[in-house]
Amino acid sequence: MKKCCLFQRRVNFLGHVLTEAGVEVQPEKVAAVENWPTPRNLTELRSFVCLCSYYRRFISEFANVAAPLHELTLLSRTERNYDVTRRELLAVVYGLKTYRQYLLGRQFIIRTDHSALQSLRRTVEPIGQQARWQTFIEQFPFVIMHRPGTRHRNADALSRRPFIEENDSDRQDRVQCAKSKASKNQQSTQKLSQASAGEAMSKLQQQDSDIGPILRLRIQQINQPRPKEVLSESEMTKVLWGQWHRLVTREDEQ
């Protein structure tokens, strides 16, 4: 019984506070984000973005606020120095990681204008980084098909957009800009995390940035939506989409 706390109005659970009004963020976690030291390198930046993403459901327009930070995490200086084949392979690995929940257990085709990738699975003894990437890739049942670059003109133009190297000062300005946008959303975040106790759970769920899109689709239709209908949604929304046939909607109990 010493470990039991009965009739509590507020309970801390997995970084959140559960109350009669709903789910809130622990104040100490908010303070930790606000007082987080400015990232000095790519590793620290990715760590900070992941921390903020954990609480994205409480932040209005999180994707737009975090966009400048995500742009900084695209390619490190080391990755930009990769040879062409390694960069092409990196793109494949990145794509597989991003859409993993959609691709596992499904046969699909990867089309590329880089013919060297066709021999990817025929490498006899891959070593180092290629060996690690190949171990990850082997869990997916796919076929690589070569497509000449002349038939990829639109994709080529987007992927070969000129890259302007930024100095440390420019990067610092962009990070500060992102933090400024985040602070402007703090007020709306607090309102969202402290919903009134009188609101129905279904209303709160429909307003949720992760649950809402799937809930609205589930109410409107029985058949699972096509992937492109949730392509622009959050990762958690896509995970819920993958569990579509397990989802059950229920009326609010008064």
Image (spheres, rainbow, N blue to C red):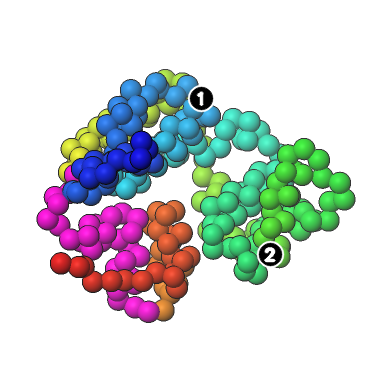
Quick check: is 218 in the magenta stretch?
yes
Which amino acid is tagged 1? Asn
Distance from Cα at disc 2 to Cα at disc 1 = 35 Å
Q: Mark 2 points at which residue?
A: 142
Please tell me which residue is depicted at 18% across the width and 38% down the height of the picture: 187
Q: How many marks?
A: 2
Rendered-image quadrant of the C terminus:
bottom left
Quarter assignment of residue 231 = bottom left
Quarter assignment of residue 141 = bottom right
Residue 40 higher or lower than 140, as above or below? above
* x, y percent for residue 245: 45, 73
* Local SS, label 1: loop
* x, y percent for residue 181: 27, 35
Rendered-image quadrant of the N terminus:
top left
Quick check: is 224 in the magenta stretch?
no
Relative to the observer, which residue lies in front, 5 or 29?
A: 5
Which amino acid is tagged 2? Phe
Q: Residue 41 carries which label?
A: 1
* Local SS, label 2: strand
* Magenta highlight range: 194-222
How many C-alpha atoms fall within 10 Å of the one at disc 1: few (<14), some, or many (≥20)? few
Mark 2 or mark 1: whose residue is earlier in sequence: 1
How many C-alpha atoms fall within 10 Å of the one at disc 2: few (<14), some, or many (≥20)? some
Residue 24 can be seen in this image: no
Q: Residue 4 carries which label?
A: none
